[in-house]
Image: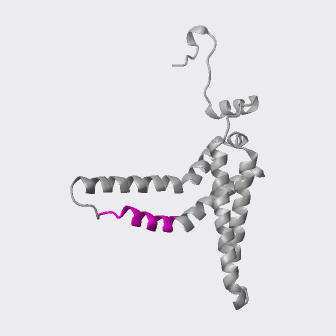
Amino acid sequence: MHRRLYLASLVLLQIALIAWVARPLAQALNFETAPGLAAGGWPAVLQLVATAITVVASSVVLGFPVVAFARHRRSGALRFAGLPKWATVIAACGAAALCVGFLAHSLVPALPADARFTAVLVARSVAAAGLALATAGVLCSELLRRSVAITREALDHQRARSARIEVTHPPELRTRVA
């Protein structure tokens, strides 16, 4: 259950980063890099290279939850076992706050007219806090992940999945590691 909540947090965080953060970030990068405004020659080339690096690096940052999710799906439950529990709880709480903020924001039209402005301010603040909390939890989880010794059952399962047969007898046909 806890692992599923964390994986759901990764998916929700990815959606929030794309839908909510990507556009303002692109506008800020466009303003900061001001592509095409440098004088011709080397300054223009350096500016274009720096802009390209900025775009690629920002893409990696915005795609981090998908990368973490893919690694968890590939490695299975054993990868989750190495994550600090406190960090995964922070990520799940952040995702919950993000959902509450977006839900409250979607219910604003149903409120009385005098309460709408306050509800929008509170909902956006809760959603922003949830986004920050989920991001912090995921980053702490993935960065502080520790290696977990593979149990015998997991090792047997891994060998069964790989379908590789180790030859040990006769000695002249023994499988050797390169």
What colouring style does the render use?
one colour
Q: Residue furthest top?
A: 171
Q: Is residue 41 visible?
A: yes
Q: Is residue 5 visible?
A: no
Residue plotted at (51% across, 64% down): 22
Residue 148, image quadrant: top right
Q: Position of residue 64 (x, y in %)?
A: 56, 52
64 in relation to 34, above or below: above
**Count of all numbered marks drawn on residues in the image:** 0
Along the horizontal axis of the image, is 62 left or right of 34?
A: right
Q: Position of residue 90 (x, y in %)?
A: 72, 54
Residue 23 is inside the magenta segment: yes
Along the horizontal axis of the image, is 58 left or right of 90?
A: left
Q: Nearer the viewer, residue 125 or 104?
A: 125
Residue plotted at (64% across, 41% down): 75
Residue 144, image quadrant: top right
Q: Nearer the viewer, residue 54 or 102?
A: 54
161 in relation to 1, above or below: above
Along the horizontal axis of the image, is 53 left or right of 153?
A: left
Residue plotted at (73% across, 90% down): 112
120 in relation to 20, above or below: below
Residue plotted at (72% across, 44% down): 84
Q: Residue furthest left?
A: 41
Residue 126, image quadrant: bottom right
Q: Position of residue 56 (x, y in %)?
A: 43, 53
* Magenta stretch prevailing secondary structure: helix
Residue 139 is inside the magenta segment: no
Q: Residue furthest right?
A: 1
Span highlighted in magenta in the image: 22-36
113 in relation to 94, above or below: below
Q: Position of residue 45 (x, y in %)?
A: 27, 54
